[in-house]
Amino acid sequence: MNLSETAFIRKLHPTDDFTKSACFGLRWFTPTNEVPLCGHATLASAAVLFHIKKNINPTLTFITLSGELYAREATDHIILDLPLYLTYPQDVQEVEELVKAATGNMTIQDVCYSPDTKKLLICLSDDYGRSDLEKLKVNAQELLLAEKTGRVKGLIVTLKGSLHGKHESYDFYSRYFAPWNGVSEDPVTGSAHAVLSSYWSQQLGKNKMRAFQCSARGGELKIMLRNDGRVDIGGQSTIVLEGFLTI
């Protein structure tokens, strides 16, 4: 469908029912390939099951390439239970050309790497604000040419939030680019926030945070780190289109 990811939900057994069953298979595909985790498409899948199929279960389990994922309704939003991925300091010289392609001459505060997700995280200096991140022009083709390690499949540019100002208060902001998976820029990315949650929790000393992804469309995420090495990420959903896919 030429979206960042298209999700495919499947019954695990012939007798399963989309209304009564609590466990389903779930796979995600970008315009070019299958990916191991997509939070936003998981949110959409849960929304369809809860709101269109009227699934009767309070919590849904999805069997995926990233293990079991869970989704539950909470008032006006859906909460996803995702793995929490750690980041580690990255030798900047190894990715210097890639960092330059992504951020130009902006001052960098930190560069980290998440080996489990193959995502590179670039944190901008605290001197910048949300508008600076929104104005950043990133050329997807330049990212592809600049990545020489073969280890990066997604790039996060992030920035510490502001608790005061003309915008709503957020703990951190981000943008996410994945041309290696056929996605120039993803509007809102749950899988990236499974990495960002770990990084910013350590930086801010907080387990509960509000985040905003500064794409052209933009999106707010509510984050709660748990004691079992996982993270709850909450977001709202709206059904905007229904149709049939003929295979």
Image (cartoon, grey):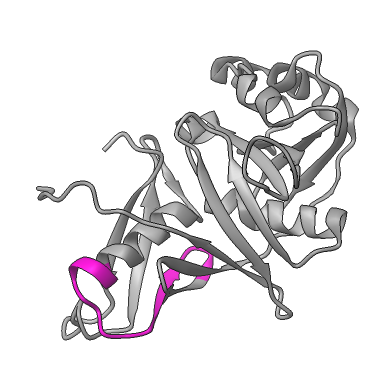
Residue 221 screen position, x and y as percent: 56, 54
Q: Is residue 161 left or right of residue 88?
A: left
* Image quadrant in which you'd find residue 213: top right
Q: Residue at x 70, y 80 (%)?
A: 228
Q: Residue at x 44, y 53 (%)?
A: 40
Q: Position of residue 73 (x, y in %)?
A: 41, 74
Which is nearer the eye, 157 or 170?
A: 170
Identify the image quadrant of residue 194. bottom right
**Left or right: 55 as drawn, with respect to 97:** left
Is any part of residue 236 visible from this angle? yes
Residue at the image point whose x is 79% and y is 60% from the top: 201
38 or 207, which is in the foreground? 207
Decide: is 171 above or below 93: below
Front in this rendered view, residue 191 or 223: 223
Q: Is residue 46 above or below residue 120?
A: below
Indicate whether 194 appears above or below 61: above
Per the image, is 208 magenta? no
Residue 159 is situated, as x and y percent measured from the top left of the image, at: 75, 37
Q: Is residue 143 above or below residue 70?
A: above
- 236 horizontally vs 179: left or right: left
**Residues in magenta, as a range:** 49-67
For the N terminus, give its image quadrant: top left
Residue 147 occupies which quadrant of the picture? Answer: top right
Q: Nearer the viewer, residue 80 or 83?
A: 80
Residue at the location (42% across, 58% down)?
236
Residue 196 location (% of width, % of height): 70, 51
- Residue 66 on the magenta span: yes
On the picture, is 18 further left or further right than 180? left
